[in-house]
Image (cartoon, rainbow, N blue to C red):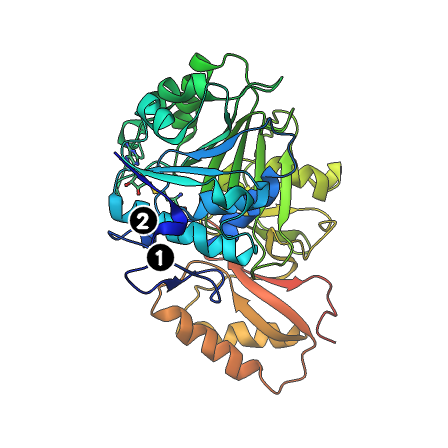
Amino acid sequence: MELLVPSEQTPSGQPVPDSSLKELSFHHASDGKPLATPWQVAETRAQFLTEFDLPSGVVLDCACGSGIQLAAYASRLKRPAIGVELNRKRAVASCLNLNTIAHRHSSFNQGWHRRSLVVAGDGTKSDSIASAVGLEVNSVAVLVLDPARPRNSRTHGLDEMQPSLVSVFQAWKPYLSETNHGPSIVLDLSPRLTENLREDVESIVESFWPGVDKTWTWMSRGGGRVDRLELWIGGVATPNVTKRFVRLSPSFGGENTVFEQNQSFEGSRPSLQSARRNEWVTILDAALVESGLVDAWLVEQLSSAADVRWAESSPRRPRIHHNGPLKDHSHPFVVASGRVVDVLDVPLNEANMDAIVSAALSNDISAMTIRCGVDADLQPRLQGSIDRQLRNRQGRRKAFLTKHTGSNHLLLCVQYPENSNL
Ligand SMILES: C[S@@+](CC[C@H](N)C(=O)[O-])C[C@H]1O[C@@H](n2cnc3c(N)ncnc32)[C@H](O)[C@@H]1O
């Protein structure tokens, strides 16, 4: 085990621009870059953490990697960072990145930064780490953990996490400062954890702190993908909020869209039988659906008479049919929403392009996007043909084309509001 003082470390290699904010560069070592948290994600979490009333003490990250998330938390909370990292080169990179962020906050070698330390060693050896860095019992305000996982994992099993949740909780429990709501812990877990594995994580937490509050948080940077999954525990859980979905702004510093579920919600999902003219079709953010928060969100977006039917489409393009429009058709969780103006009984292929475009023209359409699964080779050819044929014609409405599941029926949907391109 080796104690590293951040301000005493000198860079050996070139830092690499962050994927979410190019003007900021970080050091990585031993192929640590893919493991590192993008700065936009790290800052969003850190900003969120400042909203809690935390006990006094340090921020401890016992598998800190390149230290990016740790630097975001410590600089926002203005608390000393204690990082532990098994790989010595990465531990040095953590020091350098803490220095970068301290400079960014004009606090290099002052306040939180002056008292921050990184240990190159095993993050589960709490007693020796505590005596090396001078930590007493109840002196950790927040424990954060982003365990290493095999990159090609199929199961995302809890036993693959390094270090394991149990070993970290066992080691650090006496050092965690407890609020009325228990200790404050943020776990950064695999975004692919199944519901069963999430329950297993909850059971482990319960075995250490029975009855403690827990808020699962899904984070998506767009494209229908869940990029991050966290469990916020105890003093940093939001009371009565079991699930939160955060759609990060497409650019750094923009506004994020957050949806929270306050109680458990069991929505039933009737499946779509047949598609009809004039009904509404909405393609939803796949990441919101994956988080399990979509049903609660739809209750806010649709009247109770909406009679939602779920098209059995690919998980990449979840689609609902409903009566009546969404309250906010341009909400960030909506990929496309519109009304069926035509149902065409033809397969989507090159031979039928003229018939499809002619239907679009007779429905006053100026632009139409294909929004259903088509072979990757074929898709640009079909879309290109639609674009060329509709260009310079007199249509005034924007539309999308989707396919009814289980039949050849193509649904031509005019986007809302109908005159959006006038
Ligand atoms: C996913 S990375 C953390 C990335 C970090 N959150 C960031 O923002 O850069 C996990 C790290 O845990 C480290 N690790 C694994 N087992 C450990 C242990 N027992 N003690 C300390 N670090 C460990 C790995 O070397 C790896 O760098």
Pointer 1 local density, CA inside 10 Å: few below 14, some 14–19, many at least 20: many
* Mark 1 Cβ and ligand 1 under 8 Å apart: no
Seen as rendered, the residue at the extreme bottom is 392
Looking at the image, which residue is at 50% across and 48% down?
42
- Closer to the camera in the image, 214 or 10: 10
The label on residue 362 is none
Ligand 1: give its quadrant.
top left
Work out how far the residue at label 2 is from the one at label 1, CA to CA, in angstroms.
9 Å
Residue 238 x, y percent position in the rendering:
63, 29
Q: Is residue 296 above or below residue 5?
A: above
Q: Which residue is mark 1?
A: 27
Q: How far from the left and from the top, in percent, is residue 212?
A: 55, 17
Query: Circle 2 sits in a helix, a strand or a loop, which is it?
Result: helix
Q: Residue at 49%, 67% (x, y): give it.
A: 23
Residue 239 lies, in percent from the top left, at: 64, 25
Quarter occupied by the C terminus: bottom right
Q: Nearer the viewer, residue 289 or 204?
A: 204
Q: Which residue is mark 2?
A: 92
User: Which amino acid does the dot numbered 1 rest on?
Assistant: His
Element at badge 1? loop
Task: Confirm or deny contact between disc 2 and disc 1 (CB under 8 A).
Answer: yes
Observer able to see residue 273: no
Q: Would residue 266 be found to the left or right of residue 329 on screen?
A: left
